[in-house]
Amino acid sequence: MLTLLQAVLGFDNLLYISLESKRAPEDQRAKVRRLGIGIAIGLRIILLYAVIKLIHTFHHSIVIFDLNNIIEGDFNLHSVILIFGGVFIIYTATKEILHMMVLSSYENTEEHSKSVSMVIFLIVSMNVVFSFDSILSAMALTDVFWVMATAIVIGGLLMIWLSDRVSQFLEQNRMYEVLGLFILFVVGIMLLSDGGHMAHLHLFGYEITPMSKATFYFIIGILILIDFVQTRYQKKLFRQNRKKNSITEPLN
């Protein structure tokens, strides 16, 4: 059950890793993915041990805001990490989406000249952010450390095995990169809402409520359905235009 949970919760993380690794030099991308996930597995186990021992510290208040009904919140370490991760993912997804809309070649941009160490650092950092949900969900099922650690290792090895395949699929089907970026955007919103809810955040008197997992997967399903229908429709228009041109060409 824990291994299956790690696999399901690791989907958005795997998507981020596949897209982020494209910033590394092409001959280093597979190495970056494996090394980043490998380091993240070790850090996730350390984080699991720390959360078990210091669970109260993660939920201890560190910053309190109360600005006359403009912003109110009681932030703890857990909520700050989720909010930071959500903001960073939204920023990254938005930047890449806007970048794709630029007329200049996507392949010749400076974004792909990122150093290997920087890409690995970003992958490991975001993996730690994504780890909190899976770790807290695992702790709800069992309190046996070695069981949770084993599930984390198996889930990490599964991510290493799938990372090359997901990256290869996105490389061969570039049109799905846009879908992946919008899914990451939704993931960022979910992390942001979860962090705001944990911090009891109120903006202009309105409480920040978390996005439920059912809502998240429903939105992802709708995005995939829209992409599928749009792709089929474009192919249909292409075939119709090609057939029309083949009929009218002899007349010219």
Image (spheres, rainbow, N blue to C red):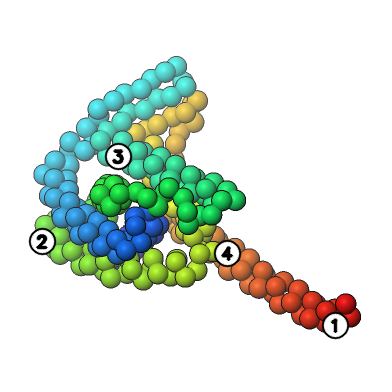
Mark pair 1, 2: CA separation = 73 Å
Q: Nearer the viewer, mark 4 or mark 1?
A: 1
Mark pair 4, 2: CA separation = 41 Å
Q: Nearer the viewer, mark 4 or mark 2?
A: 4
Residue drawn at (46%, 20%), measured in percent from left and top? 69
Residue occupied by mark 2: 146
Q: Position of residue 118 (x, y in %)?
A: 29, 47
Quadrant showing the N terminus: bottom left
User: Do the CB atoms of the residues marked 1 and 2 lie less than 8 Å apart?
Assistant: no
Q: Residue furthest right?
A: 251
Residue occupied by mark 3: 81
Horizontal side of 225 relative to 125 (left or right) equals right
- Give me the disc on residue 250: 1
Q: Earlier in the sequence, mark 4 or mark 1?
A: 4
Residue occupied by mark 4: 227
Disc 4 marks which amino acid?
Asp
Residue drawn at (60%, 51%), measured in percent from left and top? 103
Q: Position of residue 205 (x, y in %)?
A: 49, 26
Q: Nearer the viewer, mark 1 or mark 3?
A: 1
Horizontal side of 244 relative to 172 (left or right) equals right
Against 158, is 76 above or below?
above
